[in-house]
Amino acid sequence: MKNLVKRALSLLFLLTFTLPLLACSDNEEYTEYGNLTLRICNWEDYIAEDDDGVAMWQEFESWYEQKHGVDITVEYSTFGTPEILYNNLKINPGCYDLICPSDYMIQKMIEEGMLDTFDIVTQIPNYDTYASGYLKNLFEEKGWTSYALPYMWGTMGFIYNPEEVPDEDAFSWACAIDDKYFNKTTIKDSVRDTYFLGVALAKLDYLSELNEKYTSSAITKAEYQATLAATFNDTSEEMVNSVEQVLKKAKQNAFSIEVDSGKDDMVTGKVHLNFAWSGDAVYAMDEAEESGLILNYAVPKEGSNIWFDGWCMPKGANTKLACAFLDYISDPEKAWENMEYIGYTSAIAGDYVFDRVLETYDVGADAEGAEEVDLSYYFDNISRPATLYVDERNRQFDAQYPNESITTRCTIMDRFTPEQDKRINDMWNRVKAGEIGLYLIVIGSTAGVFLIAALIVILYKKDVFVARPPKGYKRIS
Amino acid sequence: MKLRFARKHLCIPYALFLALFVIAPILIMLYYAFTDSEGGFTLMNFASIFSDITALSAVLSSVSIALLTTAICLIIGYPVAYILARSGLKHGKTLLLLFITPMWINFVMRLNALKEFFALINILDKSAYFNTVIGMVYDFLPFMILPLYTTLIKMDNSLIEASQDLGANKIKTFVNVVIPQSMPGVISGITMVFMPSMTNYVISDILGRSHITILGKLIENYFMQNNWNMGAAISMMLLAVMFVFTWLTGGFNDDAANAKGVGL
C-alpha cells in the first residue's frame, strides 16, 4: 500500500507541474494555408455575441472557411487582469497568437521584446481604411503602430447624479475629498486608476491653472499635453507621499472602494459620485434610465486619463491568421456590433459608424435644446462634415464620443517600472489598510482574550469547576 | 504480478485528490513563501508580516473581528443549541432546520440582501467594522450551532440526573456537568467560525464596503499585485495558526475519546 501511494503521489507531482505546460500545446499543424489554429486571449465580455450566444470569433471561423475553403480552429480564452496575462506569457511564451492587453502592458511587452510586429497597411487593410486618425496618430507618437492595434478606448471621470451634484462640482476632482459628499463618493480598488486620481487631487490647483493657461491660449496644445503627461506620470517618492495623504482623505470620504459595485450603488442612489471608466458610465446611465433616474458623466477639467486596449501578437504567434481576424473585426459593421455589445468606443470610425452614431444620438438642428457638436477630430475619414446635433449633454453621447476639448485634457499613463510598481503598490496597500479605530481593536481584543482565557481554563484547569462539597460534608476518598 | 482488488484500493481516488489538490498546492505555496521575486531563498516575507504596518494592521483587524464574531456566535449559539437539543421541543428538528435553511441560499446573495437591508435601516454607511462583524455572525452562526447541537443531543441524560440527585442545583449542574461535556462542540464551533472569519473578505467587501482589509483581502491584494511571495507567506502563517490550534485542542489524537474537539 505504502509503495502504491508513493508511486501515485510522485506521478501526480509530475502531472501537477507538467499539465499547465501541456495545456498550451505548440502549434504544429501547418498546411499550404499556414497554421490553422488561432489562439486568442481577451478580456472577459469583450467581444460581441449575437442573440443565440454565437460570439464573433465563432462567426470568424465559419466566415474564413467559406471564404478560403479551409477549416480553421479558434481557441478563445479570457484573462482577468493584464498582469495575469503577462504572467501566463512569461511562464509559457508563445501560448497565444493574439492578446488584448491595456496600454501600459503593451508598452511593457514592447520594451521587453515580447511582441511580434505586423504591417497594418498590407495585412489589416480594413483598419487602415476605417480607423480614426486620432488613434492612429496617438499610437504612432508612442511608437506602438507596428506592435499593437487599438481596439477599444475610453476616459476616466465621474458618474454623478445631477440632482445631488451640480455640474461645476462634478467637473472637478476636488469633490472626491469634499466634505459635502461625505459617504457619497467611491474610489476604485485598482491601483493605477486610483494613483491617477491621487495625482489629480494632490495637484489640483496646479492642474486647473494649467488648463486655464491652455484655454486662454497662454500655452500651446503641445505644451499643455506634454506638461499634463509629465505631471500624471510623476512617480517620485515625493509625489507618492503626497498622493498617499490625499488618498487617505479620499478613502475616509468614500462610501466604498470598489471595482464593480459602484455602478449599482449609483443606480440605487447609495452614492452620488462614482469614479468610473466611461464604458461603465454608459452602462450605469442606461440602467438608471430604466428606473427613471438620470445620471451624468463628467471628465473633470483638471485633466484625466485616456486609456486603450490593443491587439498584440506575442513572439512566435500565428500572425497570418491573427491579421485575418483583426481585419475581420475592423470591418465597420463588426466594430459597431462590438461597440454596442461592450459599451466602450471602438477605434474604427468611417461612414458606417458615423451613420449609426447619427441614428443613435442626432436630434436634428431644430430640436429643442439641440447643440451642434463637431467630431471631425475623430471621424476624420468620412465623406461629409462630422457634425451632429445632440440635446442631452454630459450623458451617453459625451461619454462615448468625448469632444476634442475633453480628449485634449486627457493623457496616457505610462507603465510603471518594477521599482515604481512596488512603491505605488505599497502606498496603496497602506492606504487600504488604513487606521482602524483604536477602540475597535480594544473591544475586539478584550472580547477575544476573555474567550481564550475561558477556553484555557476549561480545557486545562478543569478542577476549577469541580464541585466543592457544601459545608458540613466531608469527602470520603 | 497479479492485480487483485483489495479494499485498500478504494482509497486511491482520495489519495489522488489529496495529492493533486491539497499537497501539491501547499508545496507550491511553501516555495513561494520562502523565496523572493527573483526566486532566491529568503525569510523576509515572514519578517515583513510583523514589521510592515499594512500587514500588521490587517492582522490586528482580522484577529479582533474574528474574536468578536466568535464570541458573539458562541453567546447566541450556545443557548439556541441547548434549547433545541435538551428542552424536548415538539418541533425541535424543524427549528434546527430553520437555522440551517439560510445556508442553502448562496451567501453572496444573502450578503447583498443584508446590504440592502442595512441601507434601508440607514446603518450601511456607519461603522464598516460593526457591519462586517454582524455579517460574519449572520453567516457563520449555523457553523457554531450545529456542532454544539450534535454534542448536546448526544449527552447522557443520566449524568445530569445524577448531578441533581447529588444535590446540585440547576446552575451548578449546568456549569459542572453540561458545559464540560459540551466542550468538544464548543471547540469545533470556535474553529469553524474563527478561521473563516479571519479570511472571508467577501463579507468585509460587501458590508464593510472594502474599508476594512482583513488577512484574506490582503492575500488577494498581494496576488493581484503579482506579489505571490507575500501572499503565500501570509497563507502559510494562517495555516500554521490553524495547525497550532488543532494541535492544542487534540485534533491530532487518534484516540477519539481523548480528543477535546469533535473531528472537523
Image (cartoon, coloured by chain):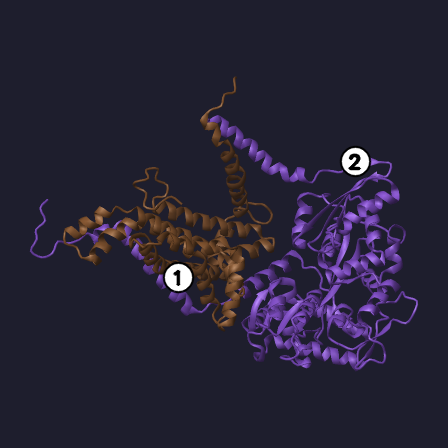
**Kind of residue sitting beneath label 2:** Glu
From this view, report whether residue A195 is shown above or below residue B28. Answer: below
Q: Residue at x 90, y 51 (%)?
A: A122
Q: In the visual, does B218 lie left or right of A174? A: left
**Kind of residue sitting beneath label 1:** Leu
Number of on-image labels: 2
SS under mark 2:
loop
Q: Residue at x 76, y 56 (%)?
A: A310
Residue A21 seen from this side: yes
What is the quadrant of residue B66 in the picture? bottom left
Which dot marks residue A91? Answer: none
Q: Chain A appears in which tint?
A: purple
Which quadrant: the C terminus of chain B?
Answer: top left
- Give coordinates of residue B38: x percent, y percent: 60, 47
- Give coordinates of residue A139: x percent, y percent: 81, 60
- Give coordinates of residue A444: x percent, y percent: 39, 64
Circle 2 packing at 10 Å, graded few (<14), some (14-19), many (20+), is few
Chain at numbered mark 2: A
User: Which residue is tagged 2?
Assistant: A29
- Give coordinates of residue A130: x percent, y percent: 87, 60
Q: In the visual, does B214 lie left or right of A321? A: left
Chain corresponding to brown in the figure: B
User: Which residue is tagged 1?
Assistant: B68
Circle 1 packing at 10 Å, graded few (<14), some (14-19), many (20+), is many
Q: In the visual, does A423 lie left or right of A210? A: left
SS under mark 1:
helix
The front one of B99 and B173 is B99
The front one of A28 and A69 is A69
